Amino acid sequence: MALDATSFSKLPLGAKIGVLVGIIVLLSVLFYFVLYMRVSNAMGETDSKYEVLRKDLRVAEEHRKEYVALRDELVLREALDQQNLRSLPERAEIPAFLQDLNRVAELSGLKILLVEPLPEEQSEHYTRVPVSLRLSGRFHQLAKFFYHIGKLERAINMENIRLGDPVSTQDEVILKVSVLATTFRRLDAEAAASAPSAPQGGAK
């Protein structure tokens, strides 16, 4: 039975209170199931998504750190490889080697009497590239030459140094020097594969 305002006003106080309580209970139930439950479920889903996103963010941050570490290691390795290639190139590069020797000799004030490339000598881990040199100049010029050879990026050994008889002029002494300038290069793939390996298991 419908309850209008006139009928409600005629009800006794207890009935009025009962009706109001019923209306409040009904509204509370509707609020709980229609609004609160939806909001609660939405918040629960949001919290779950938030935790998933936080986990994804932590994983992404770990991956980023790994990437940065690998990138830095790669840059370092590339720099070391470039440095090693300059010190121990893959090819003999005789023209560049001779140019370096000639440039340092000229800067040191020496006179080059002989430049004679010799046959390469293969060892187990690298190939020797020797060049026989004969130079002449004053003592401090020779010292300057050997010093600056040691500063070159490419590995160069100065071996079998032999001094000739000094020649005296008006105010200076000229020395003649014979030296074997030896640089090195990496073994190519074929030579490295055929190079003898180290002795195994007590073999003699």
Image (cartoon, grey):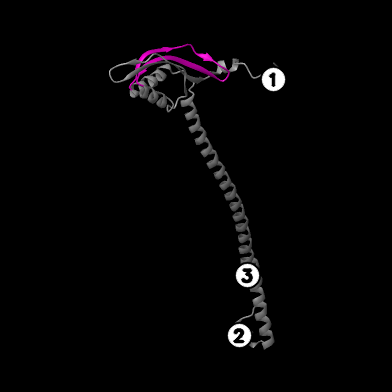
Question: For the view shown, which residue lies furthest in the left direction?
Answer: 170
Mark 1 or mark 3: which comes first in sequence?
3
The residue positioned 61% from the left and 60% from the top of the image is: 42
Q: Quadrant of the C terminus?
A: top right
Calculate the distance from the C-alpha at mark 1 to the C-alpha at mark 2.
113 Å
Q: Give the mark toward the camera: 3 or 2.
A: 3
Tell me the residue that label 3 is attached to: 31
Q: Quadrant of residue 147?
A: top left
Mark 1 or mark 2: which comes first in sequence?
2
Tell me the residue that label 1 is attached to: 200
Calculate the distance from the C-alpha at mark 3 to the C-alpha at mark 2.
28 Å
Where in the figure is residue 108, as x and y percent of width and height?
35, 24
Mark 3 or mark 2: which comes first in sequence?
2
Q: Three-letter amino acid code at disc 1?
A: Gln
Where in the figure is residue 120, as x and y percent of width and height?
49, 13
Give SS at disc 1. loop
What's the magenta region? 109-138
Q: Give the mark toward the camera: 1 or 3.
A: 1
